[in-house]
Amino acid sequence: MTKRQAPLIVGNWKATPRTLLDATTFIKKLEQKIARRKEKLPKKLYSIAVPDAFIHPLSVLAKRGLIGGETVHGTTLGQTTGISTPSQLASSGAEFVIIGHSEVRAQGETQEARKEKVLATLGAGLQTVLCFGERTRDKEGVYLEELESDVKETLSAIPREYFNKLVLAYEPIWAIGAKEPARANECFEVVIALRRALASLVGIDHAKKVRVLYGGSVTLETMNSFLQEGGVDGLLIGRASQDVTTFTDILVAAYQ
Ligand code: PGA
C-alpha cells in the first residue's frame, strides 16, 4: 500500500511539561526547527493536545500547527465546579480535542458521556479525535465486534454534516505507553473494521471524510510502517511528541 497524502500527526502531551515556560519554549523551538527545514512542508503540519492551562498561550505561538485539548470535562455551562466546556476550549484557542482516550476512560468516562461530548465538541466547531481500542485481543475476534459497536453507538446521534470534522484514533490499550507498538497488519485489520462501522452508520460518502489514526508507542522508527501498511491517515503520538527534536523528525518524515 502506498503512503497517503498529507498525514495528520497529532501529539498528546498528557500531563507534561512541568511549567508554562517549558511549554512555550518547546513550541518556540519547534517553530524554529520547522522554519529551518529545507523540505517542502505543509503550512500547518502539527497538532498537539496540551493541558487546558496551556491552550491559550500556546495557540498564540503555534504558527505552523494547531493546539488542542486532551479531553473536555463537560458539555453544559453552569454551576459545575472543575469543568471546561467545548465553547470554553474553542474560545481559548483550541482547534481540536481528543475524546475517549483510554487514560480518560480509565478515570470513569462512560460511553454515554463520550456520546454527549462528541456531539458538543463537533457542534462547537472543534475537530474531534475520538479514540477506540481494545484492552486485549481474543482469537475469535470478539474485540473487533466490540470496537465496531462502540463506534456505532458513540456516533449514533451525530449529524452527518459533522463527519468532516471527525477523526477516529485506533489506540490498542496494550500498546499505549508500552515498549512495542502494534504491528502494521494488526492495525490494518482494525482500521478496516472501524471504517466498516462508519460506513454502515452513515454511508460510504460520509464515512470517507473521517480520517483514522493509529496511536500507541509510535516512534520515528515505526511511524512509516503504519502510514504505509497500517491503512491509517495519520498518527496519535504520546511520548515521542514530548521531545522537540524527535517530534520535528517525525513531522518531517511523515511528509517525505
Ligand atoms: P505513547 O502514547 O505514544 O506514549 O504510547 C500514545 C497515546 O497515549 O496517545
Image: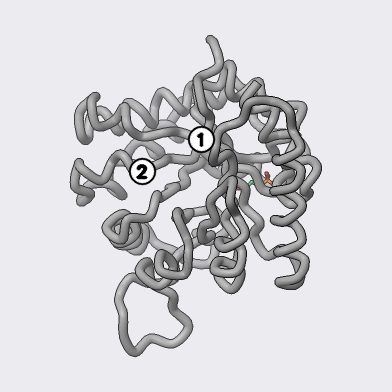
- Observer able to see residue 120: yes
Q: Earlier in the sequence, mark 1 or mark 2?
A: 2
- Observer able to see residue 138: no
Q: Which residue is mark 1?
A: 213
User: Disc 1 marks which amino acid?
Assistant: Leu
The one of 4 and 130 positioned closer to us in this rendering: 4
197 vs 106: above or below: above
- Give the percent coordinates (x, y) of residue 15: 67, 65
- Give the percent coordinates (x, y) of residue 70: 53, 59
Judged left or right of residue 187, residue 182 is right
154 vs 16: above or below: above
Judged left or right of residue 176, residue 37 is right
User: Disc 2 marks which amino acid?
Assistant: Leu
Which quadrant holds residue 49?
bottom right
CA separation in Å, label 1 and label 2: 11 Å
Q: Quadrant of the C terminus?
A: top right
What SS does tag 2 mark?
Answer: strand
Q: Which residue is mark 2?
A: 166
- Give the percent coordinates (x, y) of residue 167: 41, 41
